[in-house]
Image (tube, coloured by chain):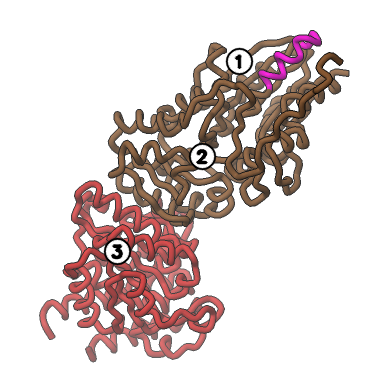
Chain colours: A red, B brown
Amino acid sequence: MTANRARVAEHAYRIRRNALRMGEVQGQGYIAQALDIADVLAVAYFNAMRFRPEDPDWEGRDRFLLSNGHYAIALYAALIEAGIVPEEELETYGSDDSRLPMSGMASYTPGMEMSGGSLGQGLTIAVGRALGLKRKGSDAFVYTLFSDGELDEGAIWEGLMSAAHHKLDNMIAIVDVNNQQADGPSSQVMAFEPLTEKMQAFGWFTQRIDGNDLDAVIAAFDAARNHPLAQPRMIIADTLMGCGVPFLEAREKNHFIRVDAHEWQLALEALEAGRNQA
Amino acid sequence: MSTATAQKPKLKTSAMIASIAGEGQRTVAAPFGHALVKLAAERPEVVGMTADLAKYTDLHIFAQAYPERFYQMGMAEQLLMGAAAGFAHEGAMPFVTTYAVFATRRAYDFMHQTIAEDDLDVKIACALPGLTTGYGPSHQAAEDLALMRAMPGMTIIDPCDALDIEQMVPAVAEHKGPVYMRLLRGQVPLVLDEYDYKFELGKAKLVRDGRDVLVISSGIMTMRALEVAKALEADRVDVAVLHVPTIKPLDTSTILREAGRSGRLVVVAENHTTIGGLGEAIATALLTAGVTPPFRQIALPDAFLDAGALPTLHDRYGISTNVMASTIKNWLG
């Protein structure tokens, strides 16, 4: 294991642990998604993006737009790990007057670039941000994370088409394909495959990876940033709901998880055990 | 009658783009487009964005003058609003255009979530407001004000004529935050230059005073109200006209002052359904303040409107000058 990979893996572990600790505060939440996307967030914040923890609005930063606002617990976990949000606020998650509401909102949280919650909007905002950055002559990237469920929304396809039309080579979109949405498996709610071919046909430089294979995620982010052609970049990340906590991975209904009080400690222990094996 | 060959007025087309200018009325071409070009010269942050309707919202004037600051987003109104939000996050001031129906009905959530919630400097200019096309309900934005009034943080403007539009464009740029503007495009009537009038954001203006009736109106209905006032002079009915170009926030102090002057019938006239527009806004303001003059509404019905020629439809739904004048006369008894 390279030193860099070990460093990013440690951040991924700590992002998962932060998310579990926040979940424990409320006894429920979109925990399985936080666990599945932790590797992507670790690579984004600790191996790809430019940002200044002490100045979240620094003009030169890369922008990270969380389109799927219900993944907020995952992003908070990363923002805490990145030092943008103080760790002690973790205990306020989802509580009155907290800066960490259950659905991500830009006006509440430092480092949160958009208000999600109404799905399928992030990519459209990202298009405008990418156009705006180009107009300013900035070399910052706009990262957008959305989920396979959001592919149901028509605005996603409006955004996909326009990003290629406007040759937005400063856009890097990540689709989290965990095949789980509110009413069941995404592929059954609304079939979306073959996704790679669709994205390529829409004019995006597209990579499909195992989103929980840290080496693959690091390589994909590198390739997305360094791609030489004037086109937007897509990373399709197949992920495992609950990744890192075996008894949560095994749960069938894990779109919105309620975990019994005693299970949080078990989950943290399982995560710790997996870390020692890695 | 001496004019036995009373000619039927030539009806205008029911096509989507029908002129709202009357026969022989003075007009100005594309006032929005030209005002935006003028503004853009002073404000480098201004960009123009549209959803495949530049030519039909007068934004093509801007696109010709500033091609590098014009962004075509395709026939995709949700994308238009989301991208405008993203652009504004990066310090631009987008003026986005489409038709009022598509912005308000189709992209409501995007205006609400991506623009209004973040209080972004996006100016949304929407053509074919209210009943200004005979093309049918798909294109008739009879309920746009109701929808937009319900959106927190949204400033709403309903200009009367070319002068209003020319003055509104720099004023909304000065205002920080999102703005929804009803837009008159093409050959736009010029009316208010005859009066001592200047557009001020958030202000209602008494354009004409009168003893018997106070018409409170916005948009093209102010033009109609002024025509009605002239027509009723012959019947010795003295009509005052209070123009309310800013629907939200509403200038309640001016409205209360004028409506509180005793002895006048108060008529709210709007190019919008009776539901949720200027009439209901004013009724609420009056009742809340305990001001209760005799009160009537001239507005579109709560119905899917007919397709047809605009003059026909304006007669049918009571917002033409002639029908409005006789309606008010009947109310006076």
Residue B161 left/right relative to B212: left
Task: Have a look at marks 1 and 2 and say if they share a chain.
Answer: yes
Residue under label 1, please give it: B207
Dot 3 falls on which chain? A
Disc on the earlier residue, 1 or 2: 2
> What amino acid does circle 3 point to?
Tyr
- Disc 1, disc 2: CB below 8 Å? no
Residue drawn at x 86%, y 15% is B1
State the separation of the CA atoms marked 3 and 1. Answer: 52 Å
> Which SS class for mark 2?
strand
* Front residue of B100 and B320: B320
Q: Which residue is denoted by mark 3 in the rendering?
A: A143
Write down the chain letter for disc 1. B
* Residue B262 placement (x, y as % from top left): 76, 13
Q: In this view, does A158 lie above or below A4?
A: above
Q: Where is residue B143 in the image (x, y as percent from the top left)?
A: 65, 44
Q: How crowded is mark 2: few (under 14 residues within 10 Å), some or many (20 or more)?
A: many
Determine if residue B29 is in view.
yes
The answer to whether residue B11 is above or below residue B241 is below
Residue flagged by tag 2: what amino acid is it?
A: Tyr
Taking the spot 45% from the left edge, 24% from the top edge, the residue there is B167
Residue B99 against residue A237 in the figure, above or below:
above
Magenta residues (range): B225-237
Mark 3 Cα within 10 Å, few/some/many (few <14, many 20+)? Answer: many
Q: Tell me whether circle 3 and circle 1 mark residues in contact (CB < 8 Å).
A: no
| Magenta-colored stretch includes residue A114 | no
Q: Which chain carries label 2?
A: B
> According to the image, label 2 marks what residue?
B180
